[in-house]
Amino acid sequence: MTKTDLKRRTRARESSNAIERLYITMRHLLNRGFYKPFGVSGNTLKQGLLTLRPEIYGDISSEKTELNGLKYVMDRLPKGIEECRVINMTDDEGYRISQFKPIIPPKRRRHCYRIDPEQMNIELTRGRSDVYDILTHLTFLFIESHKIRAKAVVDNQGTPGREWKALEKVVLTSQELNEAETERIIAYISGLLGRTFEETKNVYEEFKEPENPHRFFQLIYWLGKLALDEAYKGQKREIKFSPSLRESLGHHVYGEIWATNIKQVLSKNNLLQRPIHIISSNMHSVLNTLFAVKALGASNGELALYKKLSQPQHTALRQKVIELAQKNGMKYIKDASATNIDVQIFDTALFNSNDVNINLPATSERHKPVLIVMDYAFGEQAFEVMDELLKPYEAEGVKEFLNVQSISIMGKAGILVGGKGDIMIPKVHMFEGTADNYPFENELKIKDFQQDEIPVYEGTMVTVLGTSLQNRDILSFFKNSTWQAIGLEMEGAHYQKAIQSASKIRGNISADVKVRYAYYASDNPLETGSTLASGPLGELGVKPTYVITKKILQQIFK
């Protein structure tokens, strides 16, 4: 072993230990019920994150403010959280029927409520992964806020510098700025961030909103302001976990409600004994694969149509597809359980063959497939919802088992061996930080995709505790060691644990149930500039999404 190899392995061990410390600390804080970000416990999280240096957060150990990481995190936290000194994590505790207006982050389906100028409540109903995700994001935010604080003052007494005073005046007076005045404040902020004027102006443009062009100014001011108050006025920030949240985690409260709602619809329509095929994907790819071509035509090809439907301005076109699907019996179950997982049910016995863009099996009605398409779960939530869905339906003392024939999981994942848009076919899911490994027979194979001109890789997938806890060293170890991992994601091991438990231990479903897993690459965390923080996948993800969807449907109908 060379010195370089030894150094990499040592660094990977340090990173693995840091993840374990973070994981244990977060569970401890959750059980405790509260902590101060820059108290003893909060500092443990801070040091763990600085040791780990996750790729998604860029160079957080630098004295410069990490701009890409800041944009990534703020897309996943509620607007205005930077102004709040108290952040209260709650269960679903009835705020939806209150006068508080829900705030939903652009890239995370969470209901958040601004209780007063100092307090933000965040509902966490998707399991422990939700808690770990938001705590790592908040820890990053607190680290960055103190970087700003350090550059905002000119002495040890907290006397603000002229740049900070200029920024404060603009934010607190909400004064109108012309272009020259705006660029002057950007120049001041670039000094506070340790970034170039060009870098700062680019991120200013990214944060700009039609109704609030100076959103970035407000964000930087309040991050620095709360850090200044914490350092020089003793006004400590606090993170709290409500008793209801601590009691509900791990008990499948929302997963049971969610699964029961689905089974009631199946029972009402006499579908429990029909061949059921569960697909975890999204709310558009199966729908569009089945009905979009017939609803809209595809004069420029199917791929061009799917790309068009992915663009936000084409709401009317998407509605036409939905209407054709509903005409053919599609049932949409809007989530009312707080899992944030919507569901579509397709009864293929109600399909008009002239309306569907796929060959249907020539079988009797009782053998025609029923498709249950569920939106993405989040981390450990995948076990909760799949475990509950595969249980028998009980009503009036009668237990009825579901006739589940196959379970297909499609989603985005980080890739370690290729690039964005490539496809990964797992043969085993390895759960990071544990001895839990789940080998299985995947019905999808590399040969199924040979005609599609997309690179495809087959091997081990690592199910990670959170994408925000991964760094290059530990991922390189997974890739280059005997694990020979091809990618990482957050749900696979949890899904497979539920499937194997239901089929091989509890006997809730057949032991011969077919499973299909396929992921397309949203990022490569081993490549600089290709992490999730570098921006969305965009249209590059359209082709692999629909290629995988079509293969799943072809196997189901075959």
Image (spheres, rainbow, N blue to C red):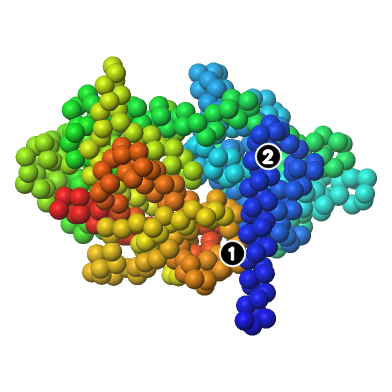
Q: Residue furthest bottom?
A: 2
Side (left or right) of 167 relative to 378 = right
User: Which is more toward the observer, 209 or 55?
Assistant: 55
Q: Name the residue at 12% across, 43% down.
A: 355
The Cα–Cα distance between marks 1 and 2, rounded to whole angstroms, is 24 Å
Residue 200 picture location, percent across and down: 66, 57
Q: Position of residue 381 (x, y in %)?
A: 46, 40
Q: Earlier in the sequence, mark 1 or mark 2?
A: 2
Label 1 crowd bin: few (<14), some (14–19), many (20+), radius 10 Å: many
Q: Residues within 10 Å of mark 2 (few under 14, many from 20)?
A: few
Whether 30 is drawn above or below 61: the answer is above
Taking depth in this image into account, of 439 and 123 the one nearest to the observer is 439
- Image quadrant where residue 542 sits: bottom left
Residue 522: tell me if it is visible: no
Which amino acid lies under the numbered mark 2 shown in the image of this protein?
His
Residue 409 position in % (x across, y down): 34, 50
Which element type, helix, strand or loop, lies under badge 1? helix
Which of these two is toward me, 536 or 512? 512
Residue 387 in sight in this render: yes
Q: Relative to residue 87, is residue 60 depicted above or below?
A: below
Instruction: Using the image, determine if residue 367 lies above or below residue 304.
Output: above
Which quarter of the rendered picture does the N terminus lie within? bottom right
Query: Residue 474: which disc?
Result: 1
Q: Which residue is mark 2?
A: 28
Q: Residue at x 68, y 63 (%)?
A: 14
Measuring 74% from the left and 62% from the top, which residue is drawn there?
Answer: 62
Q: Residue at x 45, y 29 (%)?
A: 254
Q: Amino acid at mark 1?
A: Ile
In the image, 332: left or right of 293? right
Location of residue 429 with respect to 133 vertically, above or below: below
